[in-house]
Amino acid sequence: MTDVLLSVRDLVKHFPAAGDWFAQIFDRRVVRAVDGIGFEIDRGTTLGLVGESGSGKTTTGRIIVRLIEPTRGEILFDGIDLLKLRGKALKAMRRRIQMIFQDPASSLNPRKTVGQIVAEPLRVHGMVRGKELERRLVRTLELAGLSSRFLNRYPHELSGGQRQRVGIARALAVGPEFIVCDEPVTALDVSIQAQILNLLMDLQDELSLTYLFIAHDLSVVRHVSDRVAVMYLGKIVEIGEVDAIFSAPKHPYTQALLAAVPRPDPAAPPRKVLRGEVPSPIDPPSGCRFHPRCERYMGDICKRNEPVLAAVDGGTEVACHLYSRGG
Amino acid sequence: MSGLLDVEGLVTRFYTEEGVVKAVDGNSFRLEEDEALGVVGESGSGKTVTALSIMRLIEAPGRIEAGRILFRGEDLLKKSEREMRRIRGKDLSMVFQDSLSSLNPTLTVGAQIARVLKHHTRLSRRARWRRAVELLAAVGIPEPAKRASHYPHQLSGGMRQRALIAMAISCNPKLLILDEPTTALDVTIEAQIFELIGELKEEFGMGVFLITHDLSVVASFCSRVIIMYAGKIVEEAGVHELYAHPLHPYTRGLLRSIPPLEGGEARLQSIPGEVPDLINLPPGCNFSPRCALADERCWQVEPELSGITPGHRAACWRAERPAMAGGGHD
Amino acid sequence: MAREIQNGEYELGAHRTLLQEFWRNFRRNRLSLIGGIIVLFYAVLAVFAPLIAPYDPIEQFDAPRGMRNPMPPLSRDVDGRLFLLGTDKFGRDILSRAIYGTRTLLQVAVGSISIAMLIGVTMGAVAGYKAGTWVDELLMRAVDIMLSFPSLVLAIALVGAFGIGKIRVGPFTVSNIVKIMLVIAITYSPRFARVMRAVVLQEMAKDYVAAARISGASGVRILVAEILPNTIPPIIVQASLMMATTVLTTSSLSFLGLGLQPPRPSLGLMLNEARDYLFWGAWWYAVVPGGLITLAILGFNLLGDGLRDALDPRQARRRR
């Protein structure tokens, strides 16, 4: 039996397109950032969430950690309806779900020392104090690969990689089961990226963590994930086992995305170019949202009917009419 | 025989309160006509400072201390600011990473291109606008006549980068410097931009100097690659040679840090430690504190960039042995 | 699994506290140091006025035969007492009056800026934290209305509304000096509110605030423990620059007779009195209070600029 830790159903988030309440009187359009997505993550595994800017992957992550209230939808975490939690129950849940951010510079308070930053979640939850707090801090920092010498340093005294380690330590401090990693290595230098990826994977093994790993870098996602979901304009177009998706992508968008990735090998086949740009999520294309850019566009059916995720061989689920007709 | 661009012994330093930042420390390289040369390095490697030095855009507290920058045989470091202004944007052009801050937010993109044309050509007002629209069309912007009268914030990131490229090629430059031109863009847009630059390069026969942190982008676009680390060139080779036989431990480390798209190894071979502080560089080889192969000599004596095999230079004491060049093993 | 632990042996530079960091940045700007010295000079003058001033500021001295008040600098009175900067029309020592006047001026300025900060920072913090809601809208429109008056006009109108001299509010009597502080505080609090709101908004967009929310911290805790410390630098800068403006406004009110009332020594009032004697060649009468006001404004402005450079996080020292 699989052991589902997180299950997301029909999640929708529409933001008002206009800036403030005054403009919203005249402009009632909405940005369909996330438009009805669902997925499950098994305990101890990593789901990679990939997509280009405007795909809604970051919004999805922020809804799960309850930074953004969704328009509608259901999120079950270990059988508990996350979106219904309020007050004390929500606060207690926050110990189980943490997040690692993209920009280590803005995610650490510049006026606080590393020790204060990592201690903050412990203080909020009143978990430990005094000598025990000190010991816990040192242990947590070491978990993230930093020595206790960093305790009284300020973020601006650290390198990018060290700052990200502090961000990881803060997330680990309360002993979470589930961590949303939002582009955790994007802002880092290549040689540091590998260090942080290795660290995240080691931590997963040691602490049996479950990750939602959000990234736009396909090779990074490939490396860390067990399963992958590909998003385009607020929808999941393909979801499945990482090997299946990378070796035999089904959706034309996934195929185009993979073909566009440059390889560190001059002998690799030339990059294939996907034409056009991602349309506006305010007024997404009808039917299949990818149809205006699709190489396999089949006419009316793609333009009129919105495809739904359906299983094809190998357990991958694809939202594409190419497969829905049994072809 | 000289190339399109010959940089010899370039030294650029920044005199800060904390000390002297050795941003570029005695580098020499050549870029041939029509060549696409890639410069790969992490933050603090000196790749952007190299480009700004070539453009003569180094500002206080920075200073170009030594060296020659021969562009079509003439030393740019001997030119007056007035002469440089005639060259910049015309024969020598640059596209920056951040397209939003590189464009003037108060002018339409058409007007900005027309302004470059006004500075460097004798075209009439109407002709300049016509040319601007043509250029926007040439870089693949749909509805160029309409887009020309749009302001930068009205365009997407990819469109803005195209507009910047249109501006950079407006006077048929001989050398186009690209500083991380696609770092802020999605991978599909990145592929589009490089396809465009490749086409323009063929069409105009210009040399391209591509600065990036991404070894993969260089592999698919450039014919020769320079690897920089802490202000120094540590390795230089043709693109096929470099990826097949990387000599410098840093280059090898970088290549192994990239997770393969094909999957495979569970653990990446990361380079330990951090990029050194350019004010307090370690003695000997700059990479020695992070290098698994480093020995006494590496810690004490700085290696020179020298030819190991024909067309392949590396600055490493441990790269000299032919055995190292052959296999990829440690 | 063995993990490589970074202990920062060669990566970490010398450790400095935020205060040391600030001082390093501050002292490199010579002008701001001069501003600091000027402000320090005024502070010493104000605090130790009774020790520094040679005479009682309201004691009147008689001019010797053949001379009349106001007497020029370095004159002596009947009893041979020396007046370094001369006397005023009532035969009072200008130096002593200027020193005590400075003291009053700074009292009013510091007092009113403190009150203005308290009001403005609270308003701005609430508006920023509740940005986009009706609370924000209400507070900021009130701020807009107050800022649409020229500040001196608003101050004069408020004095007019309260009345001159000490006033009675219900069972309390408010002394004249406190009333003036309140008037100026009300006039300038909107500017603090504006700055504060902008800074709070800017900080709220950063991920460390998101991280605090994910940690389970309450809204109040986030505002007080996470955001407020980051708003202190811009508020200090604003306060220093506003000190300059306040010095000018206080002096202007006194000059117009709406501020501090005689016989309390006040620089603005001295200037007003000196007006009548300028044609008689009594330059020292106006130059001393005028110079002190100008220098104070210069000092606070220089200091404010220097603080801005030293405290602005965008200018903060980067390691590479």
Image (tube, grey):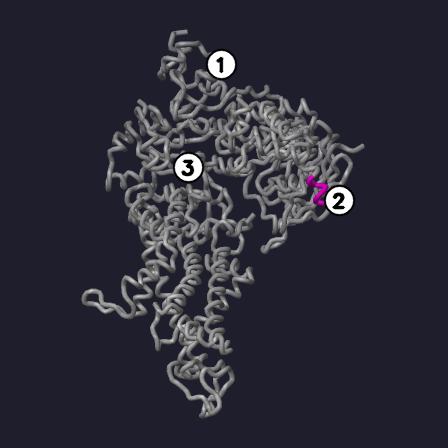
Measure the C-alpha gap from mark 3 to mark 1.
Answer: 41 Å
Which quadrant of the rendered structure holds the N terminus of chain A?
top left
Answer above or below: position of C30 versus A121: below
The residue sitting at the front extreme is: C279
The residue depicted at 47 percent of the width and 41 percent of the height is: C3
The answer to whether B99 appears left or right of C265 in the picture is right
Residue range highlighted in magenta:
B77-85
The picture places residue C197, in percent across and down from the top left corner, at 37, 49
Measure the C-alpha gap from mark 1 to mark 2.
Answer: 54 Å
- The amino acid beneath tag 3 is Leu
Displayed quadrant of residue A85: top left
Which disc, if any, is residue B107?
A: none
Which quadrant of the rendered structure holds the C terminus of chain A?
top left
Name the residue beneath numbered marker 2. B78
Which disc, if any, is residue A295?
A: 1
Q: Is residue B314 magenta?
A: no
Closest to the observer: C204 or A167?
C204
Q: Please, which chain is the residue tagged with disc 2 on?
A: B
Please rate how many residues cluster around mark 2, counting C-alpha atoms within 10 Å: few if below 14, some from 14 to 19, many from 20.
few
Which disc, if any, is residue A203?
A: 3
Q: Nearer the viewer, mark 3 or mark 1?
A: 1
* Residues marked 3 and 1, same chain: yes
Q: Nearer the viewer, mark 3 or mark 2?
A: 2
Q: Is residue C52 visible?
A: no
